[in-house]
Amino acid sequence: MLTEKRKFKINLKNLNYVLQHPSILKNILQGKSREEIRANARRLNELQVERGYLQESQKFISSLKKTSPYYTGTNYQPKLNRLCYIEDWDNKEFKNILKELQTTTYDTYINRKEWRIPTKQTILNTNRNSGFIHRKDWEWTLGIIAMKRFNKLNDKCRAIDIGAGREEVLFYLANHLKHVYATDLYDGKEWHNFALSDFPENPKKYAPFPYKEDALTVLRMNGTRLEFPSETFDIAFSFSSIEHFGGENHEGALKSLREMERVLKKDGIDVIATEYIINDKEHPEFFNRKTIYSDLIDKLDSLKLVEPLDLRITTKTLDTVMDFETALDTVMDFETALKLDILDNSFKKWHPLILLRVKNILVTSVMLIFQKK
């Protein structure tokens, strides 16, 4: 009797699964175990939720295209405070700087005959070739454009990078500025692929091209507590790092910007790229239309935006949306990034990494350029 009752309960349970997912019937007819049926049901439930996220995101994009279409040409002078556009890769000013970043030799740096690119790399070199469209290149390029426009990209200016990791732009700026100080935790724990523990002692090991080695200093330092005197730097910059500094209401990001505010000289510029949600969802790290102001911009004292912030996104950029998991499999995960070596440029060109869908969140890069008044 007990055995029959137990079977009856199991059958009812299976019936509930079947009602939710008719394909489960196949598992039952095949005599699958309870654990296998439940695991399959969980997977199907997750797929159902994911389909809901996808449909919600597609509906938002379709609505935005209809209600707020936005187009730009290719010969415009790029605004500084705005979102990432796919059209930027066809802009002349943008392309010229991007070409410098993606070229491994320059005429402008001090050549040193003894400089050699290490023959054995312990980590993938992420320097990207032309034809590969990635919003990280956009952040670096627009940041350099801002430095040029405010006459800061010269051998008289000092800069500090917060949450620097081992980004290639550090070596580019070392060739153009008096000195660059790169700061990060470099503790070999969280974000260890981006901020390697041995980078402070040997940045040359990871340099993608020759650079002025005496113009780059790498320091272990918390981005919310900068160990420098006030009014030390002409430039402070951070590319997609401050959002990861923790705290409620982006408290860590705000602390970091206030520290940058403190160490900047008067008229110095602060170049900040961070993550922005275009469909106004809430997120503990990423910013949306409300929190970019309430948690960050409106709480700064002497740092002022150099121009109004434009939070529109071009219609053409909306067509580039990529699922986050797909992005991980193609470019963002260092263990699978080697796949890029076998992908031709046509694939990279037609799979730009600009606008990402993370569940029902649509996120891209936003650039904020401040000047200390």
Image (cartoon, rainbow, N blue to C red):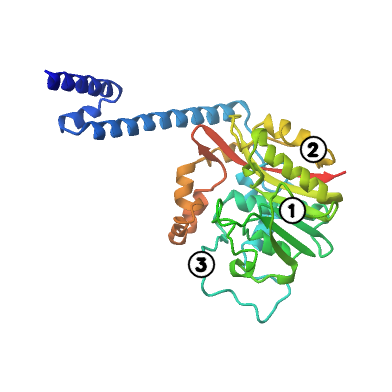
Q: Report if residue 118 is visible in the image.
A: yes
| SS for callout 2 | loop
Q: If you read the primary sequence from the N terminus, does the residue marked by circle 1 or circle 2 appear first?
A: 1
Q: Quadrant of residue 233?
A: bottom right
Taking 224 as reference, is 36 left or right? left
Q: Which residue is mark 2?
A: 300
Mark 3 belongs to which amino acid? Thr
Mark 1 belongs to which amino acid? Ile
Q: If you read the primary sequence from the N terminus, does the residue marked by circle 1 or circle 3 appear first?
A: 3
Residue sticking out furthest to the bottom? 113
| SS for callout 3 | loop
Mark 2 belongs to which amino acid? Leu
Q: For the residues labelled 1 and 3, say whether their Cβ atoms are less than 8 Å apart.
A: no
Residue sticking out furthest to the left? 1
Q: If you read the primary sequence from the N terminus, does the residue marked by circle 3 or circle 2 appear first?
A: 3
| Rendering coords of residue 55 (x, y %) | 46, 29
Q: Which residue is mark 1?
A: 145
Q: For the residues labelled 3 and 2, say whether their Cβ atoms are less than 8 Å apart.
A: no
Q: Residue at x 81, y 51 (%)?
A: 263
Q: Which residue is mark 3?
A: 122
Of residues 184 and 170, the one nearer the viewer is 184
Q: Residue at x 62, y 53 (%)?
A: 137
